Amino acid sequence: MKIGITCFPTYGGSGVVATELGKELAARGHEVHFISYALPFRLDGFHQNIVFHEVELPDYPLFEDSLYSLSLTSKMVDVVLYDELDILHVHYAIPHASSAYNAKLILNEQGRDIKIITTLHGTDITLIGLDPTLLPLVRFSIDKSDGVTAVSRFLREKTLTNLGLDREVEVIPNFVNVDQWRPQDATRLREQFAPNGEKVLVHASNFRPVKRVVDVVRVFAQVREKVPAKLVMVGDGPDRAEAERLCRELEIVADVRFLGKQDALPEILSASDLFLMPSQSESFGLSALEAMACGVPVLSSSVGGLPEVNVHGTTGYISEFGDIDRMARYAIELLTEPKRYARFSAAARDRAVKNFSADDVVPQYERYYAKILAGG
């Protein structure tokens, strides 16, 4: 099968999932064509059966704003025609689904049909999709897609309710390659994080307001009062400066490390004891799943699709959004009870392997592709 994948190439869950999906499909013998304005950051090195097509933007003084969506449409038409694609699989509704539909109309005029599958990841529905200026376009683009998938049951229901749609939306969860995301020997790294044997708490995100990185710092400050601990912050974004300021205000700078964006996440997670995710909104919680796959229990908020990933009292604990005190108590409990911690750690890894392994989830996409191609 020849599959075109369009995603945002930057850090973020939708781009990560799309890129990892493409790599897994290519490993299964499919021909995968990535179409975007830059090389996806997880697409490192050469991969058999993968081709990248860069969307070039016109540089003309008449155009004051970016014409990315139109340039993307044009590139999609070219790739479908000349590489004979079977499917365009776009991740994130705007602008990718609308560009794909425009490409479909152009191709139909040339006697060439192409099937479009749109995968929804979250803020394209819960945030951008609610913007009155974009709502009609989001609704139309999704409704005109030949197939639509969502990464959680929560997101499917939000999509149908928020957009007022009456159509099938297939739930196919996010996944991890459990051979890559697994507990590793990270002794040296752990010694760097916690030279005196302290417990290590970790958070990884794009540091946007919705991730509540300031809450991460406040939770850690309470834990540190009861348990010798260090905090590792992975990522970057608009709220990093505020989180750093709070660390200075609370006088915990010496116990917090901001690492910025990192590629060696499995090793960093393996050197950690707990993963903190107090998000205000999460349609799935891919970072939580990656931590679980590495045997790290998760402390998360109860929002969105997180309860579909993190099982309260089994793989970690779930607190109400904004309940910093409760999350800190849960952290202290796990860090001070070795037997309970060992049980949670094993259960986290087991759930990732049994429910969210690439070997189980990617075939769901393959079956869905076949269904759409057959006119389902």
Image (tube, grey):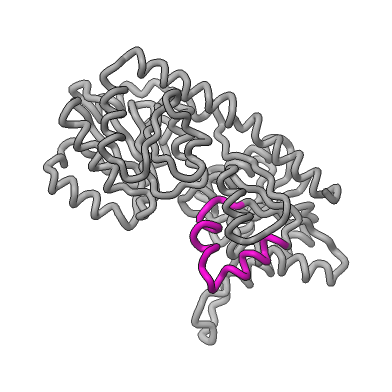
Quarter of the figure that contains the N terminus: top right
- The one of 189 and 350 positioned closer to us in this rendering: 350
Judge whether 97 appears above or below 50 on screen. below
Q: Which residue is drawn at 58% across and 56% down?
A: 92
Residue 307 appears left or right of 7: left
Q: Which residue is drawn at 51% across and 42% down?
A: 305
Residue 131 lies in magenta, yes or no? yes
Percent coordinates x, y for residue 244 in the rendering: 21, 49
Q: Main secondary structure of the magenta part?
A: helix
Percent coordinates x, y for residue 22 in the rendering: 64, 44
Percent coordinates x, y for residue 135 in the rendering: 58, 68
- Which of the 4 quarters of the picture holds residue 53? bottom right
Residue 354 lies in magenta, yes or no? no
Residue 234 appears left or right of 23: left
Specify the segment rendered in magenta: 120-143
Residue 209 appears left or right of 348: left
Count of marks, rendered view? 0
Q: Which residue is drawn at 51% across and 63% down?
A: 128
Q: Can residue 178 be seen in this view?
A: yes
- Which of the 4 quarters of the picture holds residue 167? bottom right
- Which of the 4 quarters of the picture holds residue 133? bottom right
Percent coordinates x, y for residue 219 in the rendering: 25, 38
